[in-house]
Image (tube, rainbow, N blue to C red):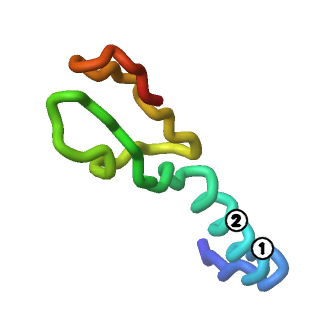
Amino acid sequence: MRISPPTSSSWPSLSTIWLQAIVLALCIQRGTAIICFDCHSDQGTCNEGECEGLVCVKMETSNIDDGARAV
């Protein structure tokens, strides 16, 4: 029994392979880390930390001294 190699028409084109690779990469890409302002009254700065995703939510904290709330 002789096996013949596949013809060129049975293989997908290079542009189709690239398009599928790009779509796959976009589907499995994780969220990019963005800088968050994670404020706690017991920490010195609010400009530290990262979170994943498109939206970063600021945490609401209250100042122990005057009870003012900061967002």
The answer to whether mark 2 and mark 1 are in CB contact below 8 A is yes
> What residue is pinned by disc 2?
20
Q: Amino acid at mark 2?
A: Gln
Q: Position of residue 29 (x, y in %)?
A: 52, 55
State the quadrant of the N terminus.
bottom right
Helix, strand or loop under label 1:
helix
The disc label shown at residue 63, or none: none
Query: Image quadrant of residue 34?
Result: bottom left
Horizontally, residue 54 falls left or right of residue 63, namely right
Q: Residue at x 33, y 14 (%)?
A: 67
Query: Image quadrant of residue 44?
Result: top left
Helix, strand or loop under label 2:
helix
Q: Position of residue 3 (x, y in %)?
A: 62, 75
Q: Position of residue 6 (x, y in %)?
A: 71, 78
Mark 1 burial class by Cα count in 10 Å: few <14, some 14-19, many 20+ = few
Check the image and name the residue furthest to the top: 67
Give the answer, above or below, for where 24 lies relative to 61: below
57 or 1: which is nearer to us? Answer: 57
In three-dimensional space, the C-alpha distance between marks 2 and 1, rounded to whole angstroms, equals 6 Å
Q: Residue at x 29, y 22 (%)?
A: 63
Horizontally, residue 29 falls left or right of residue 14, namely left
> What residue is pinned by disc 1?
16
Q: Amino acid at mark 1?
A: Thr
Mark 2 burial class by Cα count in 10 Å: few <14, some 14-19, many 20+ = few
